[in-house]
């Protein structure tokens, strides 16, 4: 055991699995509960959800909450099926898309088997592999955020691949055609994690019809403004959904969240207007950062990834925090560091840019 290795937990007669003792665990972004801050660090929607969501919660809260919820979120499955032009049997709901990523890992990956995902990307993928006692195969993005032939290279024990699309932290996206080609080359499930897809130009849900190894996960946390609700879903062929349902918790979605998520999905007018606002503000943010000397990666998500050739990123993060503005500083070993900044309201973006100018950026 090296000097920096995690020390065994002091657990009395409770034997902690060694892989759990070794792992660091998932570290979410800062969530301050006191004080006035501008939060641009966790990719939340800066606007409140649809009024229809609020009405659904209020109406459901007066119902029989002493009863267990619908175990399969049937009203939502019906709404999602209509939205995507499939049958309800193609939909599985979860307590946020993280719940679904956990279900997928538990279903397909055994101890010492492998999960592959691109790097840098969503850090939870590694955490899920470590919890499962599985190996993780991180395929480095090229500097232009593309993937080389090693992405689909065969390897013993590979049981599952995660592909965030658009990716975080870069905001970049692969086309449906590219993903279809990859799915044809591999012999394991390819999970297309579409947490940010509503902000981009297309979705891969239609690939699920033709590719029996493609599974698409989606969340209502970002585009529908429901991060505090915790609701997501996946689209997969019914034979897979049947098996995945065996692994989920008995009642993984509560009564209020089912009603709210169903109302949100059915209010596409609200979604369309919200997306227009965020895409407009994304352009404002990108242009402003570029004028401050940042190199900004073109994004199809509700955040941007930026680096500055003359500034120390971690110092900038702390200086912004001291001024009441939270952004996400991210440092990736063997890759580099930078700032991921969520798209806020126009007022929040202007405040961020004003503070950067006050700090003397880009000098």
Image (cartoon, rainbow, N blue to C red):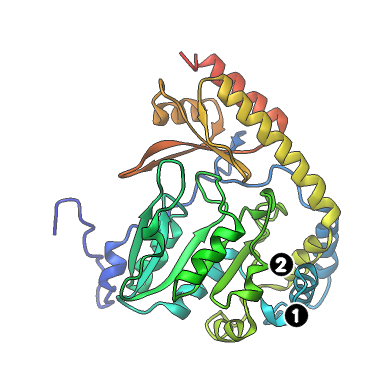
- The quadrant of the picture occupied by the N terminus is bottom left
In the image shown, does 70 or 185 lie closer to the viewer? 185
* Crowd band around label 2 with a 10 angstrom C-alpha radius: few (<14), some (14–19), many (20+): many
Query: Where residue 314 sits: x, y (%)?
Result: 40, 31
Horizontal side of residue 95 vs 247, given as left or right: right
Q: Of residues 87 and 126, which is closer to you in this image? A: 87
Residue 356's disc is none
Tell me which residue sits at (55%, 79%) in the image. 248
Residue at figure coordinates x 37%, y 79% from the top left: 110
**x, y (%) of residue 240?**
57, 82
Above-or-below relation of 191 to 68? above
Q: Which residue is mark 2?
A: 257
Q: Which of the 4 quarters of the picture holds residue 341?
A: top right
Q: Residue at x 28, y 74 (%)?
A: 17
- Circle 2 — which element? helix
Percent position of residue 117, x then y: 42, 60
Q: Which mark is residue 87?
A: 1
Q: Is residue 39 left or right of residue 336?
A: right
Dot placed on the residue nearer the N-terminal end, 2 or 1: 1
């Amino acid at each position: 055991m090296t000097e920096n290795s995690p020390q065994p937990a002091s657990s009395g007669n409770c034997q902690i699995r060694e892989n759990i003792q070794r792992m660091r665990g998932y570290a979410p972004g800062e969530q301050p509960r006191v004080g006035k801050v501008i939060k641009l660090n966790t990719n939340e929607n800066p606007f409140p959800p649809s009024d229809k969501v609020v009405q659904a919660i209020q109406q459901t809260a007066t119902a029989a909450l002493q009863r267990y919820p619908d175990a399969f979120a049937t009203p939502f499955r019906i709404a999602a099926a209509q939205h995507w032009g499939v049958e309800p049997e193609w939909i599985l709901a979860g307590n946020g898309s993280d719940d679904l990523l956990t279900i997928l890992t538990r279903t397909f990956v055994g101890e010492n088997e492998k999960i592959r995902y691109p790097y840098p990307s969503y850090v939870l993928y590694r955490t899920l592999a470590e919890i499962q006692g599985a190996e993780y195969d991180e395929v480095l993005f090229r500097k232009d955020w593309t993937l080389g032939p090693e992405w689909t290279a065969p390897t013993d024990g590979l049981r599952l691949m995660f592909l965030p699309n658009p990716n975080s932290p870069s905001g970049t996206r692969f086309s449906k055609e590219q993903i279809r080609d990859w799915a044809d080359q591999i012999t394991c499930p390819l999970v297309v994690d579409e947490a940010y897809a509503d902000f981009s130009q297309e979705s891969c849900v239609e690939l699920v019809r033709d590719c029996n190894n493609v599974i698409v996960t989606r969340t209502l946390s970002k585009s529908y403004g429901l991060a505090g609700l915790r609701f997501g879903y996946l689209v997969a062929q019914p034979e897979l959904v049947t098996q995945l349902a065996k692994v989920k918790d008995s009642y993984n979605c509560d009564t209020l969240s089912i009603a709210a998520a169903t109302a949100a999905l059915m209010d596409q007018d609200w979604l369309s207007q919200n997306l227009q606002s965020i895409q407009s503000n994304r352009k404002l943010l990108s242009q402003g950062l570029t004028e401050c000397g940042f190199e900004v990666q073109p994004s199809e998500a509700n955040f941007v990834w930026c680096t500055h050739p003359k500034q120390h990123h971690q110092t900038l993060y702390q200086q912004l925090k001291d001024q009441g503005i939270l952004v996400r500083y991210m440092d990736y070993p063997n890759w580099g560091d930078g700032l991921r900044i969520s798209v806020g309201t126009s007022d929040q973006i202007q405040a961020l840019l004003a503070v950067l100018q006050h700090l003397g950026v880009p000098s």
